[in-house]
Amino acid sequence: MTIKTKFTSALGIQHPILLAPMGNVAGGKLVASVSNSGGLGMLGVGYGDHAWLKNELEIIKHTTNKPWGVGFITWSLTEEVFDLVMHYSPNAVMMSFGDMSPWVEKIKAHNIPLICQVQSLAEAIEVKEKGADFIVTQGSEAGGHGKSERSTLSLTEEVIHHLPNTSIIAAGGIADGKSLAAVLSLGAHGASIGSRFYASTESLANDKLKQKMLESSGNDTLRTDVFDIVREIPWPKEYSGRAIKNVFTSRWHGKGDELTRQLDQHQDRFFSDQQSNNLESAIIWAGECIDSINAIHDAKVIIDNMVTDTGAIFNNNNSNLS
Ligand SMILES: Cc1cc2nc3c(=O)[nH]c(=O)nc-3n(C[C@H](O)[C@H](O)[C@H](O)COP(=O)(O)O)c2cc1C
Protein backbone atom coordinates (compact mmCIF):
# COMPACT_ATOMS: atom_id res chain seq x y z
CA MET A 1 0.00 0.00 0.00
CA THR A 2 1.38 3.40 -0.96
CA ILE A 3 -0.19 6.72 -0.03
CA LYS A 4 1.34 9.44 -2.17
CA THR A 5 1.18 13.13 -1.27
CA LYS A 6 3.18 16.22 -2.21
CA PHE A 7 5.20 15.58 0.95
CA THR A 8 6.16 12.00 0.02
CA SER A 9 7.05 13.06 -3.53
CA ALA A 10 9.15 16.02 -2.42
CA LEU A 11 11.09 13.96 0.12
CA GLY A 12 11.34 10.80 -1.97
CA ILE A 13 9.69 8.67 0.72
CA GLN A 14 7.03 5.98 0.52
CA HIS A 15 4.58 6.93 3.29
CA PRO A 16 3.29 10.30 4.58
CA ILE A 17 4.66 9.56 8.05
CA LEU A 18 7.25 11.70 9.77
CA LEU A 19 8.89 10.58 13.00
CA ALA A 20 8.55 13.56 15.36
CA PRO A 21 12.07 14.70 16.37
CA MET A 22 11.88 13.70 20.03
CA GLY A 23 14.98 14.72 21.99
CA ASN A 24 16.64 11.73 23.75
CA VAL A 25 13.98 9.39 22.31
CA ALA A 26 14.26 9.59 18.52
CA GLY A 27 17.90 8.51 18.25
CA GLY A 28 19.79 7.01 15.34
CA LYS A 29 18.27 3.54 15.53
CA LEU A 30 14.67 4.78 15.48
CA VAL A 31 15.42 7.35 12.76
CA ALA A 32 16.99 4.70 10.54
CA SER A 33 14.16 2.22 11.18
CA VAL A 34 11.47 4.75 10.28
CA SER A 35 13.33 5.79 7.14
CA ASN A 36 14.07 2.19 6.16
CA SER A 37 10.34 1.45 6.60
CA GLY A 38 9.31 4.17 4.15
CA GLY A 39 8.68 7.12 6.49
CA LEU A 40 10.91 10.11 7.24
CA GLY A 41 13.01 9.52 10.35
CA MET A 42 13.83 12.75 12.18
CA LEU A 43 16.62 12.89 14.75
CA GLY A 44 15.60 14.78 17.92
CA VAL A 45 18.53 17.12 18.51
CA GLY A 46 17.07 18.17 21.88
CA TYR A 47 19.32 20.62 23.72
CA GLY A 48 22.34 19.66 21.61
CA ASP A 49 24.52 17.27 23.65
CA HIS A 50 27.54 16.87 21.33
CA ALA A 51 28.72 13.40 22.33
CA TRP A 52 25.19 12.01 22.15
CA LEU A 53 24.53 13.64 18.79
CA LYS A 54 27.75 12.36 17.22
CA ASN A 55 26.97 8.84 18.33
CA GLU A 56 23.41 8.93 16.97
CA LEU A 57 24.44 10.60 13.70
CA GLU A 58 27.06 7.87 13.14
CA ILE A 59 24.35 5.23 13.66
CA ILE A 60 22.18 6.89 11.01
CA LYS A 61 25.11 7.14 8.62
CA HIS A 62 25.81 3.44 8.90
CA THR A 63 22.26 2.05 9.00
CA THR A 64 20.21 3.83 6.34
CA ASN A 65 20.66 5.22 2.88
CA LYS A 66 17.06 6.47 2.76
CA PRO A 67 16.08 10.13 3.30
CA TRP A 68 16.17 11.28 6.93
CA GLY A 69 16.11 14.60 8.74
CA VAL A 70 16.78 16.44 11.97
CA GLY A 71 14.62 18.51 14.27
CA PHE A 72 16.09 21.46 16.16
CA ILE A 73 14.63 23.24 19.19
CA THR A 74 15.04 26.68 17.64
CA TRP A 75 15.47 28.81 20.76
CA SER A 76 18.28 26.58 22.07
CA LEU A 77 20.18 26.04 18.80
CA THR A 78 23.82 27.11 18.53
CA GLU A 79 26.09 27.43 15.47
CA GLU A 80 28.27 24.60 16.78
CA VAL A 81 25.39 22.15 17.02
CA PHE A 82 24.01 23.25 13.65
CA ASP A 83 27.39 22.69 11.96
CA LEU A 84 27.92 19.31 13.62
CA VAL A 85 24.53 18.04 12.45
CA MET A 86 24.69 19.50 8.94
CA HIS A 87 28.07 17.82 8.44
CA TYR A 88 26.10 14.54 8.19
CA SER A 89 23.98 15.88 5.29
CA PRO A 90 20.39 15.37 6.47
CA ASN A 91 17.71 15.48 3.76
CA ALA A 92 15.40 17.83 5.69
CA VAL A 93 15.53 20.19 8.66
CA MET A 94 12.68 20.89 11.05
CA MET A 95 12.64 23.98 13.27
CA SER A 96 10.30 24.09 16.26
CA PHE A 97 9.68 26.54 19.06
CA GLY A 98 11.04 30.01 18.42
CA ASP A 99 12.04 32.39 15.65
CA MET A 100 13.78 30.48 12.87
CA SER A 101 14.70 33.65 10.88
CA PRO A 102 18.44 33.55 11.71
CA TRP A 103 18.69 30.00 10.36
CA VAL A 104 16.70 30.18 7.13
CA GLU A 105 19.53 31.22 4.83
CA LYS A 106 21.95 28.71 6.33
CA ILE A 107 19.44 25.88 5.83
CA LYS A 108 18.55 26.97 2.29
CA ALA A 109 22.25 26.95 1.44
CA HIS A 110 22.13 23.16 1.91
CA ASN A 111 19.35 22.93 -0.68
CA ILE A 112 17.06 20.82 1.49
CA PRO A 113 13.45 21.34 2.61
CA LEU A 114 12.80 23.48 5.67
CA ILE A 115 9.95 22.15 7.80
CA CYS A 116 8.56 24.43 10.54
CA GLN A 117 6.38 23.30 13.43
CA VAL A 118 3.81 25.92 14.49
CA GLN A 119 0.88 26.19 16.87
CA SER A 120 -1.32 28.85 15.27
CA LEU A 121 -2.45 30.22 11.90
CA ALA A 122 -0.58 33.48 12.52
CA GLU A 123 2.65 31.56 13.02
CA ALA A 124 1.97 29.41 9.96
CA ILE A 125 1.61 32.53 7.80
CA GLU A 126 4.76 34.00 9.33
CA VAL A 127 6.98 30.96 8.73
CA LYS A 128 5.61 30.58 5.20
CA GLU A 129 6.62 34.17 4.44
CA LYS A 130 10.06 33.52 5.94
CA GLY A 131 10.70 30.49 3.74
CA ALA A 132 9.18 27.32 5.25
CA ASP A 133 8.67 24.62 2.62
CA PHE A 134 6.44 22.46 4.83
CA ILE A 135 4.46 23.43 7.91
CA VAL A 136 3.70 21.13 10.82
CA THR A 137 0.51 22.17 12.63
CA GLN A 138 0.83 21.02 16.24
CA GLY A 139 -2.31 20.79 18.34
CA SER A 140 -2.53 21.01 22.12
CA GLU A 141 -3.11 17.27 22.48
CA ALA A 142 0.43 16.58 21.23
CA GLY A 143 2.99 15.00 23.52
CA GLY A 144 6.02 17.06 24.52
CA HIS A 145 6.46 20.81 24.27
CA GLY A 146 4.19 23.25 22.53
CA LYS A 147 2.04 26.26 23.19
CA SER A 148 -1.10 25.54 21.23
CA GLU A 149 -4.49 26.36 22.58
CA ARG A 150 -6.01 24.65 19.55
CA SER A 151 -6.65 21.01 18.82
CA THR A 152 -4.94 19.36 15.87
CA LEU A 153 -7.92 18.83 13.57
CA SER A 154 -9.35 22.34 13.72
CA LEU A 155 -5.94 24.05 13.59
CA THR A 156 -4.82 21.92 10.66
CA GLU A 157 -8.02 22.56 8.73
CA GLU A 158 -7.77 26.30 9.36
CA VAL A 159 -4.16 26.47 8.17
CA ILE A 160 -4.93 24.38 5.07
CA HIS A 161 -7.80 26.73 4.26
CA HIS A 162 -5.63 29.85 4.49
CA LEU A 163 -2.50 28.38 2.87
CA PRO A 164 -3.96 26.14 0.16
CA ASN A 165 -0.71 25.92 -1.81
CA THR A 166 1.45 24.84 1.11
CA SER A 167 2.04 21.27 2.19
CA ILE A 168 0.77 20.86 5.74
CA ILE A 169 1.72 18.05 8.10
CA ALA A 170 -0.48 17.50 11.15
CA ALA A 171 0.96 16.75 14.60
CA GLY A 172 -0.78 15.71 17.80
CA GLY A 173 -3.10 12.79 18.42
CA ILE A 174 -2.09 10.63 15.46
CA ALA A 175 -1.23 7.12 16.59
CA ASP A 176 -3.00 4.72 14.24
CA GLY A 177 -4.47 4.33 10.76
CA LYS A 178 -7.75 5.96 11.72
CA SER A 179 -6.18 9.19 12.92
CA LEU A 180 -3.77 9.23 9.97
CA ALA A 181 -6.76 8.86 7.61
CA ALA A 182 -8.51 11.70 9.47
CA VAL A 183 -5.76 14.25 8.90
CA LEU A 184 -5.19 13.15 5.29
CA SER A 185 -8.95 13.55 4.74
CA LEU A 186 -8.68 17.15 5.92
CA GLY A 187 -6.12 17.76 3.21
CA ALA A 188 -2.91 17.37 5.23
CA HIS A 189 0.00 15.91 3.27
CA GLY A 190 1.39 13.91 6.15
CA ALA A 191 1.49 13.34 9.89
CA SER A 192 4.23 13.97 12.43
CA ILE A 193 4.01 11.22 15.02
CA GLY A 194 5.67 11.25 18.44
CA SER A 195 3.99 9.31 21.24
CA ARG A 196 3.27 6.22 19.10
CA PHE A 197 6.98 5.93 18.23
CA TYR A 198 7.99 6.55 21.86
CA ALA A 199 6.51 3.10 22.50
CA SER A 200 8.55 1.46 19.73
CA THR A 201 11.27 -1.14 20.21
CA GLU A 202 13.92 1.21 18.82
CA SER A 203 13.08 4.31 20.85
CA LEU A 204 15.67 5.31 23.44
CA ALA A 205 13.05 5.68 26.19
CA ASN A 206 13.53 3.38 29.16
CA ASP A 207 11.38 0.19 29.05
CA LYS A 208 9.73 1.00 32.38
CA LEU A 209 8.61 4.37 31.01
CA LYS A 210 7.35 2.83 27.77
CA GLN A 211 5.34 0.36 29.84
CA LYS A 212 3.88 3.21 31.91
CA MET A 213 2.77 4.87 28.67
CA LEU A 214 0.97 1.68 27.58
CA GLU A 215 -0.91 1.56 30.89
CA SER A 216 -1.90 5.26 30.85
CA SER A 217 -4.71 7.12 29.13
CA GLY A 218 -5.02 10.61 27.71
CA ASN A 219 -6.69 11.67 30.96
CA ASP A 220 -3.47 10.82 32.77
CA THR A 221 -1.59 13.56 30.88
CA LEU A 222 -1.34 17.29 31.52
CA ARG A 223 0.46 20.30 30.10
CA THR A 224 2.93 21.59 32.65
CA ASP A 225 6.12 23.61 33.07
CA VAL A 226 7.30 22.01 36.31
CA PHE A 227 9.73 19.60 34.64
CA ASP A 228 11.48 22.53 32.93
CA ILE A 229 11.55 24.58 36.13
CA VAL A 230 13.14 21.81 38.19
CA ARG A 231 15.71 21.10 35.44
CA GLU A 232 16.35 24.85 34.99
CA ILE A 233 15.82 24.60 31.23
CA PRO A 234 14.99 28.16 30.14
CA TRP A 235 11.98 27.54 27.87
CA PRO A 236 10.23 30.77 26.86
CA LYS A 237 7.28 31.32 29.21
CA GLU A 238 4.54 30.57 26.68
CA TYR A 239 5.63 26.92 26.29
CA SER A 240 4.62 23.96 28.39
CA GLY A 241 4.92 20.23 27.75
CA ARG A 242 2.32 17.48 27.80
CA ALA A 243 3.47 14.60 30.00
CA ILE A 244 2.07 11.80 32.14
CA LYS A 245 0.99 12.98 35.59
CA ASN A 246 2.83 11.62 38.62
CA VAL A 247 3.54 12.40 42.26
CA PHE A 248 5.89 15.23 41.26
CA THR A 249 3.32 16.99 39.05
CA SER A 250 0.62 16.54 41.72
CA ARG A 251 2.89 18.30 44.20
CA TRP A 252 4.19 21.11 41.99
CA HIS A 253 1.96 21.79 38.97
CA GLY A 254 0.68 25.37 39.25
CA LYS A 255 3.24 26.16 41.97
CA GLY A 256 6.19 27.05 39.76
CA ASP A 257 7.23 30.09 41.82
CA GLU A 258 7.38 28.06 45.02
CA LEU A 259 9.37 25.33 43.26
CA THR A 260 11.80 27.93 41.88
CA ARG A 261 12.43 29.25 45.40
CA GLN A 262 13.06 25.74 46.74
CA LEU A 263 15.08 24.28 43.87
CA ASP A 264 18.13 23.47 46.01
CA GLN A 265 15.96 21.28 48.25
CA HIS A 266 14.44 19.25 45.43
CA GLN A 267 16.84 19.00 42.51
CA ASP A 268 19.17 16.25 43.79
CA ARG A 269 16.28 13.94 44.53
CA PHE A 270 14.62 14.78 41.20
CA PHE A 271 17.74 14.04 39.17
CA SER A 272 18.49 10.80 41.02
CA ASP A 273 14.86 9.76 40.42
CA GLN A 274 15.38 10.34 36.70
CA GLN A 275 18.50 8.15 36.77
CA SER A 276 16.57 5.30 38.41
CA ASN A 277 13.41 5.90 36.33
CA ASN A 278 11.37 6.30 39.48
CA LEU A 279 7.80 6.62 38.23
CA GLU A 280 6.92 9.03 41.04
CA SER A 281 8.75 11.78 39.20
CA ALA A 282 9.92 10.36 35.85
CA ILE A 283 9.34 12.63 32.86
CA ILE A 284 7.27 10.82 30.24
CA TRP A 285 6.30 13.30 27.54
CA ALA A 286 3.13 11.87 26.01
CA GLY A 287 0.10 13.00 24.06
CA GLU A 288 -3.60 12.43 24.58
CA CYS A 289 -3.52 9.69 21.92
CA ILE A 290 -1.86 7.20 24.27
CA ASP A 291 -5.29 5.60 24.82
CA SER A 292 -4.76 3.84 21.52
CA ILE A 293 -1.18 2.72 22.21
CA ASN A 294 -1.37 -0.75 23.72
CA ALA A 295 1.80 -2.54 22.71
CA ILE A 296 5.45 -1.88 21.96
CA HIS A 297 6.24 -2.69 18.34
CA ASP A 298 9.10 -2.26 15.91
CA ALA A 299 8.79 0.99 13.96
CA LYS A 300 8.23 -1.02 10.80
CA VAL A 301 5.20 -2.79 12.30
CA ILE A 302 3.78 0.54 13.51
CA ILE A 303 4.14 2.05 10.05
CA ASP A 304 2.87 -1.01 8.15
CA ASN A 305 -0.22 -1.27 10.40
CA MET A 306 -0.97 2.44 10.04
CA VAL A 307 -0.63 2.45 6.29
CA THR A 308 -2.71 -0.72 5.87
CA ASP A 309 -5.51 0.61 8.09
CA THR A 310 -5.49 4.02 6.41
CA GLY A 311 -5.60 2.33 3.01
CA ALA A 312 -8.57 0.19 4.08
CA ILE A 313 -10.46 3.30 5.18
CA PHE A 314 -9.78 5.08 1.90
CA ASN A 315 -10.84 1.97 0.00
CA ASN A 316 -14.19 2.19 1.76
CA ASN A 317 -13.42 -0.88 3.75
CA ASN A 318 -14.43 0.68 7.06
CA SER A 319 -17.12 -1.13 9.02
CA ASN A 320 -18.28 2.21 10.36
CA LEU A 321 -19.29 3.36 6.89
CA SER A 322 -21.29 0.32 5.78
C1 LIG B 1 8.73 12.21 24.08
C2 LIG B 1 8.53 13.41 23.21
C3 LIG B 1 9.59 14.29 23.00
C4 LIG B 1 9.44 15.37 22.13
N1 LIG B 1 10.53 16.17 21.88
C5 LIG B 1 10.45 17.10 20.90
C6 LIG B 1 11.62 17.81 20.50
O1 LIG B 1 12.71 17.62 21.04
N2 LIG B 1 11.50 18.70 19.48
C7 LIG B 1 10.30 18.90 18.84
O2 LIG B 1 10.24 19.68 17.90
N3 LIG B 1 9.17 18.29 19.24
C8 LIG B 1 9.22 17.37 20.23
N4 LIG B 1 8.08 16.70 20.61
C9 LIG B 1 6.79 17.07 19.99
C10 LIG B 1 6.63 16.43 18.62
O3 LIG B 1 7.37 17.15 17.65
C11 LIG B 1 5.18 16.35 18.11
O4 LIG B 1 4.61 17.62 18.01
C12 LIG B 1 4.27 15.49 18.98
O5 LIG B 1 4.90 14.32 19.42
C13 LIG B 1 3.02 15.10 18.19
O6 LIG B 1 2.04 14.58 19.05
P1 LIG B 1 1.86 13.03 19.45
O7 LIG B 1 2.83 12.82 20.56
O8 LIG B 1 0.44 12.96 19.85
O9 LIG B 1 2.19 12.21 18.24
C14 LIG B 1 8.19 15.62 21.50
C15 LIG B 1 7.14 14.76 21.74
C16 LIG B 1 7.28 13.66 22.57
C17 LIG B 1 6.11 12.72 22.79
Image (cartoon, grey):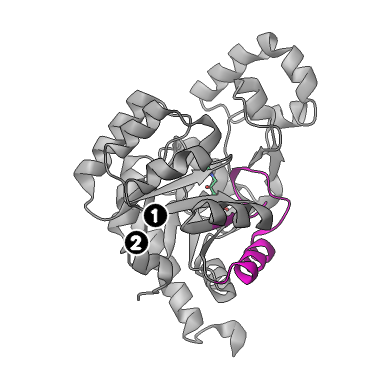
User: Where does residue 22 sit, x and y in percent of width and height?
Assistant: 47, 42
Residue tagged 1: 113
Q: Quadrant of the C terminus?
A: bottom right
Q: Please tell me which residue is depicted at 75% across the width and 26% down the height of the picture.
A: 252
Report how far apart the C-alphas of labels 2 and 1 lie in the structure.
8 Å
Cβ of mark 1 under 8 Å from ligand 1: the answer is no
Nearer the observer, 175 or 162: 162
Amino acid residing under circle 1: Pro
Residue 159 belongs to magenta span: yes
Amino acid residing under circle 2: Leu
> Count of labels shown?
2
Q: For this view, does 205 lie left or right of residue 264?
A: left
Q: Please tell me which residue is depicted at 46% across the width and 58% down the height of the picture.
A: 133
Q: Which is nearer the N-term, disc 2 or disc 1?
A: 2
Residue 155 belongs to magenta span: yes
User: Where does residue 128 sit, x and y in percent of width and height?
Assistant: 55, 56
* Residue 15 appearing in the image: no
Query: Is the residue marked by circle 1 packed among few (<14), some (14-19), or many (20+) residues within 10 Å?
Result: many
Q: Answer whether labels 2 and 1 touch (C-beta < 8 Å).
A: yes
User: Where does residue 212 sit, x and y in percent of width and height?
Assistant: 56, 41
Residue tagged 2: 11
Magenta highlight range:
136-164
**Element on which disc 2 rests:** helix
* Image depth: mark 2 or mark 1 in front: 1
